[in-house]
Image (spheres, rainbow, N blue to C red):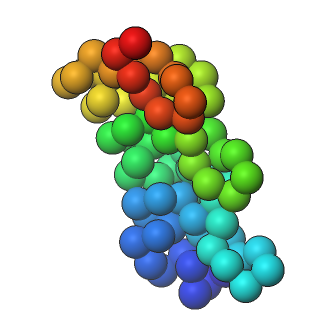
Amino acid sequence: EADCAETVICTGWGKCAIKDGKCVASAESCKKSANCKQAGLCSEKDGACTAATNADCASSQACKKAQACKAVDGKCSKK
C-alpha cells in the first residue's frame, strides 16, 4: 500500500490500496481525496471513487462553483 499511498493516484483519485497488483480506492480514501473536495467523487464503487449520492456532490467545489449538485451516472451534474 505504501507504493500507492505516496502517489497522486492516492491523493487525487483516492486509489491508495493495492488489490491484485493495482492501486484501488476504498470508501475512506475516496472521502479524503482531492477529487472528493473538487468534484464530489467521495464514494467507492468497483475500486474507483464516484459521486454516488447528491450528498457527495453537495459539499464539492463543482456544486458551489458550477451548480453541479446532483449525482448522475457517478458524476456531479446540473441535471
Image quadrant holding the N terminus, namely bottom right
Residue 44 against residue 20 in the figure, above or below: above
Image quadrant holding the C terminus, namely top left
Most extreme residue toward the right is 20
Q: Is residue 2 visible?
A: yes
Residue 43 against residue 70 in the figure, above or below: below
**Residue plotted at (40% across, 72% down):** 8
1, 21: nearer the viewer: 21
**Residue plotted at (47% across, 59% down):** 13
Residue 61 against residue 22 in the figure, above or below: above
Most extreme residue toward the top is 79
Q: Residue 14 in the image: state x and y as whole percent.
A: 53, 58
Snapshot quadrant of residue 18: bottom right
Residue 75 against residue 3 in the figure, above or below: above
Q: Residue 53 in the image: state x and y as whole percent.
A: 59, 22
Q: Residue 51 in the image: state x and y as whole percent.
A: 54, 33
Q: Is residue 59 visible?
A: no
Snapshot quadrant of residue 69: top left
56, 77: nearer the viewer: 77
**Residue plotted at (67% across, 46% down):** 44
Q: Say left or right for 75 vs 66.
A: right
Q: Residue 63 in the image: state x and y as whole percent.
A: 32, 22
Q: Say left or right for 68 vs 36.
A: left
